[in-house]
Image (cartoon, rainbow, N blue to C red):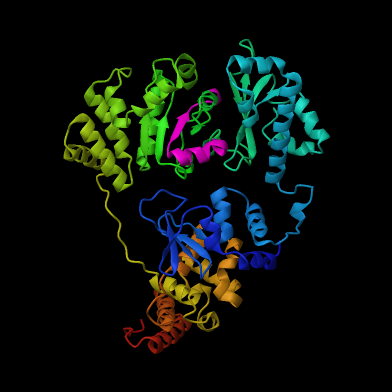
Amino acid sequence: MDQSTINEILEKTNIVDVIGNYIPLKRSGSNYKALCPFHDEKTPSFLVSEKKQIFKCFGCGKGGNAITFVRDYEKISFFEALQKLAHQAGIPIKDHKQKKVVNSKRELLLKIYALAENYYQQNLEQHGKHVKEYLRKRKISNETINKFALGYALNSYAGLKNFLIKNNINTKILSSSGLFTKNNNDLFRERLMFPIHDNMGKTIAFGGRILHSDQQGGKYVNSPTTAIYKKGKELYGLHQTKYEISKKDAVLICEGYTDFLRLYENNFHHCVANLGTSLTDEQIRLLSRYTKNFFLLYDGDQAGKNAAVRVAGKIVQSGYTARIVDFENELDPDSFLQKYSSDKLNELLSKAPNLSEFVKNDQMMGLNERSKLEILIEILNDFEDKMAMELFSREIAQTFQISENAVRRKIKRRRYEKNPTAQKNVSYDRFIEESNLLKAILHQKIEYKKVAQEIDSTYYLKEIHRKIFEFIQKNNKNIENISRNLEQIEDDLLKNMITQMIFSVPPESEPEEYIRTMKVRKLENELKQINQKIKTEPNKKEYYLQKIEIRNKLMKLNKKVVTKTIY
């Protein structure tokens, strides 16, 4: 798509309206402010400028225009974000990507997985009588089966492959789809199929469960990592339950598909499953968009309790609330709800202990109180957020009835033992003139052409400043609307730095002063290099002439430059 179409879409798009559809914005002077949707924070540092049509978070550093926000918030491609904005603005997009032939690998894989989901659902309806009987015995309703698109993989080596070929899928892509073995056979055979969806509801992977106890292979077979799926980034069921999670301001996290479905069948619609992995930082951040209150419903055996403690530690380190539901030994959400009522689980949820209480009261680990305290201190030792560390220190102290100072001293000693020479690194920004000059250009305190007549990119010693100057150089014809061109930048750090500069307060000093300083600094560096050459080759006259020329330039720029004798 050409830049003129992108510009037209952005011209007819108000970034405040776009972002306001996703998160609540409050006016703050000439800008709008909100809690950043890309990281957790208690004090708003996310700003939206209606005048400049950009957003910037001064907490995590993320920034960009309306396209950037929609793309990153919804985790979709640039083109998909552009399509959404174009639709809202009433602008038709005529592009080769809209043709029936899917061009990008990602779009092709999404098409393949949508077809595969449909294939497995057809199999369940047409050939899955025994599978439906299995689900009926497990008390999984037809409504839930349809809502989560459960399916059936035939006991066939090429059923899915043939289906995809009939639907005009080129066999060359099959090997990278994650749906086939190295021998090009169907990966899933004679299994109950659980489609895994991304946060927007697109099918990106599958989990397959055995239907007979004597089947070969593991109890579950899961999709491998592909171009559209990474296990630690997704949560099973979230696309259907995220609104209920937000409404209840709490999330129930279980380990597997059947646990999730059992919870959902019993009207616990604010749940997710973490797909057999320990909950990752990315999954925690994803859930934190909807709630800060996490309930862990892991298996009641020793392994489940250990996993719950590890995950709860990650959650509290992120500054959120973690509570652990203490099931009886060998019970999990599925078996618990088949043995007891929903009311019984609600009772457990209402009494669910926090991490410190859970560890202190646990009888299964066989640890004394001192050892239990050591487990929590080790978790606390990994904290980076000071506020979260303060709150968890208080929680530990109250639970074990010791002073907060004792907990702090323990952590201080632990960290000193780990890194006794650690010191805070405070350094002056040696490149402040460079960043100030860039800000002056972006805020139109000085024309780019005037700067370009005096200096070029070689005067910028900091690499990222040089890249910003080169971006301005490339897009200098319309500095006022330069935010429209941010999507040209693939480097997120560079994009975020530019948006930060656009959002910042313009420097007070005259831009000409920054230019002069940068010129002086460059000449002084050249003078040092010439002096070094003179030391190695003292008889070479041209070096002396070059040195005189540089010193004369310096004298004109800065009368305070100390004159030095020629060696």
Q: Please provide percent x and percent y for residue 192.
A: 65, 22
Q: Quadrant of the N terminus?
A: bottom right
| Percent position of residue 68, x then y | 56, 57
Residue visible at 45% across and 22% down in the picture: 342
Image quarter hosting the C terminus? bottom left
Looking at the picture, tell me which residue is in the foreground, 181 or 121.
Answer: 121
Pick the front one: 84 or 178: 84
Q: Where is residue 161 in the image (x, y as percent from the top left)?
A: 77, 30
Q: Give the range drawn in magenta.
A: 238-258
Where is residue 346 drawn, in percent x and y? 40, 25
For the point 35% across and 43% down, the residue is: 319
- Find the residue positioned furthest to the front: 343
**Rendering quarter of residue 429:** bottom left
- Looking at the image, residue 211 sits to the left or right of residue 244; the answer is right
Residue at coordinates 43% horizontally, 41% vertically from top-left? Answer: 291
Observer able to see residue 133: yes
Query: Seen in the image, is 25 located left or right of residue 423?
Result: right
Relative vertical location of residue 205 with respect to residue 213 in this rendering, above or below: below
Taking 196 as reference, is 412 above or below it?
Answer: below
Query: In the rendered image of this protein, does residue 64 appear above or below residue 516?
Result: above
Residue in the image at 55% along x and 52% along y = 72
Q: In this view, does 372 lie to the left or right of 475?
A: left
Displayed quadrant of residue 349: top left
Looking at the image, is 250 positioned above or below residue 77?
above
Task: State which quadrant residue 406 falls in.
Answer: top left
Q: Is the magenta stretch mostly helix, strand or loop?
A: helix
Magenta-colored stretch includes residue 53: no
How many badges with numbers are in the image?
Answer: 0
Asked whether 252 falls inside the magenta stretch, the response is yes
- Residues 95 and 410: in front is 95
Q: Which residue lies furthest to the top in this view?
A: 214
Residue 216 in sight in this render:
no
